[in-house]
Image (tube, rainbow, N blue to C red):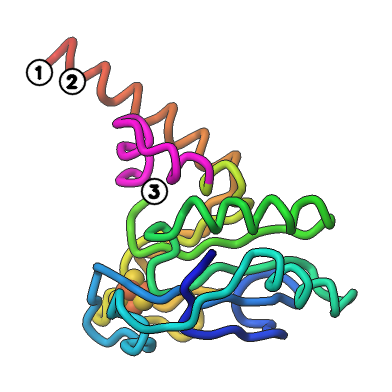
Amino acid sequence: MLTLAGIEEESIVDGPGLRFVVFTQGCPHHCKGCQNPQTHPFEGGKVHSIDDLLKCYDENPLLDGMTFSGGEPFAQAESLAALAQGVHKRGGNVVTYTGYTYETLHKGVLDGNSAWQNLLSETDFLIDGPYIEKLRDLDLLFRGSSNQRILDKKSRALLDEQNAAEKEKKTVNP
Ligand code: SF4
C-alpha cells in the first residue's frame, strides 16, 4: 500500500516522454520555497494499492513510464520498489525524485537500509537533492534548482567508484 498526496495520469514535465506520476504523502526535508507543501505532513493523503495503481497505468498504452515525486518517495521505498517492478514488467521506465542526495542514499544502503536499496535498484533515473531556492533555474530539464542532478544507473555506479577512491585516499593520507 502507498499513501499518496495525488496522481497525475499524464505528464510531460516529470521525466522523459509521457508519464504517470504519483506524488507521495510525507516529506522530512521542508525545502524553502517547495511547490508542494501540502505533501509535507506524514498524516493525511489517500491510501492506494499497488494493484490499483498498475491497473490505472495499464489503461494508457501511450505512457513511457512512471515517476515517483513527492513528498519524499524514499519514505515509502519498499512499496514504491514493488510498484516500479510492475512498471518494468510492462516495459516502462521509472524516474524517482528525492530530497536526499545520492551519496546520502548510498550511505543508507551501506548501513543496511534494504528498502532504499530496492528502490534504487528499480530506479532508472534518480533526480536527487533538495530544492534550493537561491539556485532556482527555470531552464533546467525536469529539475527546480541547479544543485539537483539526473543520475542514471551508470552515473550512480561511477559516483560510487569515485567516492570509494576518495575514501581510500583519505585513509592512506589522512
Ligand atoms: S524534497 Fe521535494 S517535496 Fe520535500 S520539501 Fe523539498 S522540494 Fe518539497
Q: Nearer the viewer, mark 3 or mark 1?
A: 3
Tell me how far mark 3 sits from mark 1, CA to CA. Answer: 24 Å
Q: Nearer the viewer, mark 2 or mark 3?
A: 3
Q: Amino acid at mark 1?
A: Pro
Give the residue pinned by disc 1.
174
Residue at the farthest left position: 174
Q: Which is nearer the eye, 12 or 80? A: 80
In percent of the image, x 25 and y 69: which residue is there? 29
Residue 64: percent from left, percent from top: 79, 68
Q: Does the beta carbon at disc 2 come under 8 Å from ligand 1?
A: no
Asked if residue 81 lies left or right of residue 100, the reply is: right
The crowd level at tag 1 (other Cα within 10 Å; few <14, some 14-19, many 20+) is few
Residue 66: percent from left, percent from top: 67, 68
Q: Name the N-terminal-most of marks 3 and 1.
A: 3
Residue at the farthest top position: 172
Q: Amino acid at mark 2?
A: Lys
The crowd level at tag 2 (other Cα within 10 Å; few <14, some 14-19, many 20+) is few
Where 35 falls versus 173 (above or below)?
below
Q: Check disc 2 and report its element: helix, strand or loop.
A: helix
Tell me how far mark 1 sits from mark 2, CA to CA. Answer: 5 Å
Q: Which residues are magenta?
A: 102-118
Picture quadrant of residue 76:
bottom left
Q: Main secondary structure of the magenta part?
A: helix
Give the residue pinned by disc 3.
102
Quadrant of the drawing holding the N terminus: bottom right
Give the residue pinned by disc 2.
170
Q: Check disc 3 and report its element: helix, strand or loop.
A: helix
Tell me how far mark 2 sits from mark 3, CA to CA. Answer: 21 Å
